[in-house]
Amino acid sequence: MAESIDTLDYRDLLQAAYETRKADNPLYSYRLMAGKLGLNVSHLYRILRKDLHLSPDKVPATCDLLRLKGRKAEHFELLVQYGRARSERTRNKLLERILSLREPARRALNAAEFKALSRWQAPVVRALALSGETEPGRIGKRMLPAQSKAVVESTLSDLAAAGLLQRDDQGRWASGDPHLTTGTAFRSEAVRQYQREVLDLAASALTRIARDQRDITSLLVEVDEEARLEIIEMVRECRRQIVRRIERCETPDRVLQLTFAAFPVAGPGETGQ
């Protein structure tokens, strides 16, 4: 296993191990790998296709196959538990443990990135800091719902540690890395956690924010695949137009959260029905 793993899906490691062995020995097969793991071939194939997960009792044999010991074996076992976990609470706890096992040079950055990007407060605090606010207490009071000074201070610290904010020569906050949604699998998971928090925030806005200060609507439609793809592109074009309009804001005085969501609530029926 590599010194640092930039994947949260342990099955990527199994697939890479198979491809390496196959390249070294053309006679290597799924059957040989399955035999080492105590699995039948079809089961292994579905695991590699990410249709199934390893059972916990197969973790020791898999670690032997991948030559993992000590810290790396523990890391792999946590990845398996993470993949099999269903509740968000359990997944987040496992992710914290996974981050703590990463190599020291990488651990601080990834932990800081996850903390900075996975909470709805982070981009709001960042936006207010970049607008000229330097006092954590004032930033917290401007937020809706209001946040404590301690929460803002912690968020600023995480943003700075992740390279998303930095102090200039006058002590004001300046922009660091502007790319918040790309990078490692850990960043991707942080973004998903952030999106969940934003959707919860939108739901609570129905009671927290006055009607004339919010616009929350929903639309349920029946579509075919062609229409679905066109609607998704329309949403993306809307986002692009909003970004272009925002670029013309010369004196912004507030932070607005926009949430777009298009997802199926019923799948296609059987052909011919």
Image (tube, helix red, strand yellow):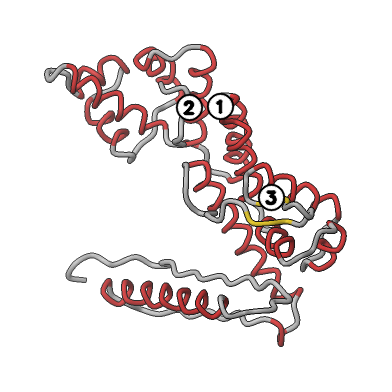
Asked whether, in this view, residue 147 is left or right of residue 7, the answer is right
Q: Secondary structure at mark 1?
A: loop
The residue to which callout 1 is attached is 102
Residue beneath the point at 85% across and 65% down:
141
Residue 268 at x, y = what percent? 29, 67
Asked whether, in this view, residue 176 is left or right of residue 230, the answer is right
Height in image: 57 above or below 49? above
Q: CA distance from mark 2 to mark 1?
A: 6 Å
Residue beneath the point at 30% across and 34% down:
48
Q: Quadrant of the C terminus?
A: bottom left
The residue to which callout 3 is attached is 166
Q: Earlier in the sequence, mark 1 or mark 3?
A: 1
Residue beneath the point at 29% across and 14% down:
36
The residue to which callout 2 is attached is 4
Residue 91 at x, y = what percent? 57, 40
Hey, what amino acid is under mark 2? Answer: Ser
Hey, what amino acid is under mark 1? Answer: Arg
Q: Earlier in the sequence, mark 3 or mark 2?
A: 2
Hey, what amino acid is under mark 3? Answer: Gln
Q: CA distance from mark 1 to mark 3?
A: 25 Å
Q: CA distance from mark 3 to mark 2?
A: 26 Å
Residue beneath the point at 43% across and 20% down:
59
